[in-house]
Image: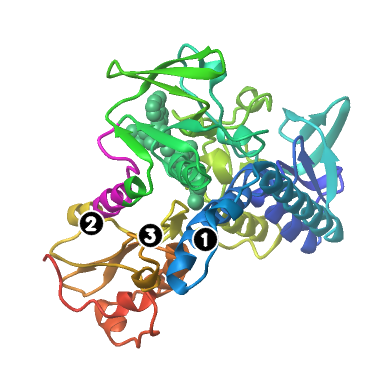
Amino acid sequence: MSENFDYDLIVIGAGSGGVRLARMSAQRGARVAIIESRYLGGTCVNVGCVPKKLFVYGSHVHEDIEDAAGYGWKIPKEDVSFDWPTLVANKNAEIERLNGIYQRLLENAGVIIIEGTASCRDAHTVVVGDQAYTAENITIATGGWPVTPDLPGKECILSSNEMFYLPQLPRQAVVWGGGYIAVEFAGILAGLGVETTLIYRGDLFLRGFDDDVRQFTATELRKKGIDLKFGVTIESVQLEGPHYQVELSDGTSITTGLVMAATGRRALIDGLGLEELGVQLNASGHIVVDDHFQTAVPSISALGDVIGTPQLTPVALAQGMVLSRRLFGDGKGEMDYRCIPTAVFCQPNIGTVGLTESEACQSHGKLRIYRSEFKPMKHTMSGRDERSLMKLIVEDETDKVLGAHMVGPDAGEILQGIAVAMKAGATKADFDSTIGIHPTSAEEFVTMREPVAS
Ligand code: NDP
C-alpha cells in the first residue's frame, strides 16, 4: 500500500459489486473511497432486484385472495381493493432503509463515501467536481443502464427505472422485450389488474432458456391473461390524447396507457474518460478485463454489469470478493462462472441452473431427459389452473446432471439447493438416492425415475 496516493483504492459506483469490493478491502486494512452519483446499492437495491421482488409479492396477492375461497375463506369481491401509491410508498420506505444500511456498512468498515460524478483524469487520479483524488488502484463498478431502440416516439417509452416510481397505474400496458425484465414486469402489471400485452420480436421469448421452459412459461402467462405477441416488434409510438398509439411491424396497432421497453441494458461508462486513458471496450460497449478484472491500464480494474459477465447481483458480489482478495489479501482467487443458478420472477417463477437441453445436445454425447409436469398441491383445492414443470438433463455416459430447470412457485428457492449439488458434481444416482421432503414440489426433483427422452 502506497503513501504516495490519497487512497489505496477508489471504487467508482456503489452498487452490489462496488460496495462489496470497497467494504472487504477496507476490512483488510486498505484506505478506500467509493464515489457514487445516484444512490447507494445501485440497480439491485434501487431499481432492480429488490423493488421488483416487492412488486411481485404485491401483484401475487390477488391470486392468494382468489385461492382462499377453496380453503373456506369468504372474501367478498367488493371488499377487495388495491392502492398503487401505497405499494410504491411502502417500497420506497424499504429502499430508503436499505440505502441507510449500505451507508452504515461502508462507514463502519472505514470506507469514505464521496457523492458526485466521477471521471478519470489519469491512471491514478479521479476527479469529482473540482476535487481530485489519487489512488494506487481504481475500480470501475458503474453497472448498466436500460437501452431503448431508436424509433419515432421513443420519448414516450418508459424503462424499468421509471416503472418503479409511476404515479398511477394505467388500465392497459404494453411491455416491449422478451428477456428477464419484460417477463417479470408483464407479470407484475397483469397481477395488479392491468391489461398487459408483451411484444417480442422472436418466435418465442426468453431466448437462452431451455425450450421446454420457454414454451411452458408462455402457456402459463397466457392463462393469467397476458397477451403475448411474438414475431412482431414496435415501429412507432404516438401520444394521442390520454393514450399511446403503438404501431407494430405486422401492420396492426394497439391503444394503451403505457409503453415500457425492456430491450436490454448497456454498460454505464458515460463521462468516465476511460477510452482516452487506453481502457478497451468490446463490441457491445463493455469494459474488457482479464481474468483478474484488470483493464488494459494496469491500475484500473472493472467488475459487475459494466464488464458484460452475467448481469446478476451475486456474480458482482463474488467478483468484488475475488478482486479484494487479489488486491489486498493473499493475491489469489479466481471467479468460477460454472453452474450459475438464476431465477426469473415471473408468475409462476422460473429457476434454472446448468445447461439447457439444446446446449447439452451440442456439447455432450447421449443424454437422458427427465421431465415432470403437474398441478401444485395447493391448486388441487384452490381450483387454479396453474401447472409446474421440472426438468433434469443428464449425461448418459457419466450420469452427471448437466441442467436443472423449473417453472413453478418458489422455483428460485428450490433451484439454489440443486445448484449446490450440481456444483459438487452430483449424478442422477445421487438425486435418486436423496430422500424427498414430503409433501413438496421440490421432492419431484429426486423422484423422476423414467427418462422421457434419451
Ligand atoms: P435481456 O438481454 O435479458 O433481454 C432483452 C430483450 O430485449 C430480449 O428479448 C431481446 O430480444 C430484446 N431486444 C433487444 N434489442 C431489441 C430491439 N432492438 N428491438 C426489439 N427487441 C429487442 O435484457 P433485460 O433488459 O430484460 O435484462 C438485462 C439483464 O439484467 C438480464 O440479462 C439479466 O442478466 C439481468 N436481470 C436479472 C434478473 C433476475 O435475476 N431475476 C431480473 C432482471 C434483469 P432477443 O432475445 O431477440 O435478443
Alpha carbon distance from label 2 to label 3:
12 Å
Q: Secondary structure at mark 1?
A: helix
Q: Identity of the amino acid at label 3? A: Thr
How many marks the image carries: the answer is: 3
Q: Identity of the amino acid at label 2? A: Glu
Query: Residue 395 appears at what percent x and percent y?
Result: 20, 68
Residue 212 lies within the magenta run: yes
Q: Identity of the amino acid at label 1? A: Ile
Query: Residue 392 appears at what percent x and percent y?
Result: 26, 67
Alpha carbon distance from label 1 to label 3:
29 Å
* Mark 3 Cβ inside 8 Å of ligand 1: no
Determine which residue is flagged by label 2.
Answer: 357
Residue density around tag 2, few if under 14, some if 14–19, many if 20 or more, within 10 Å = many
Residue density around tag 3, few if under 14, some if 14–19, many if 20 or more, within 10 Å = many
Magenta region: 202-219
Residue 165 lies within the magenta run: no
Classify residue 29 by image quadrant: bottom right
346 over 426 or under it: above or below = above
Q: Nearer the viewer, mark 1 or mark 3?
A: 1
CB of mark 2 within 8 Å of CB of mark 1? no
Determine which residue is flagged by label 1.
Answer: 65
| Residue 316 visible in the current orientation | no
Determine which residue is flagged by label 3.
Answer: 352
Classify residue 39 by image quadrant: top right
The residue shown at (49%, 67%) is: 68
Label located before the other in sequence (2 or 3): 3
| Residue 372 visible in the current orientation | yes
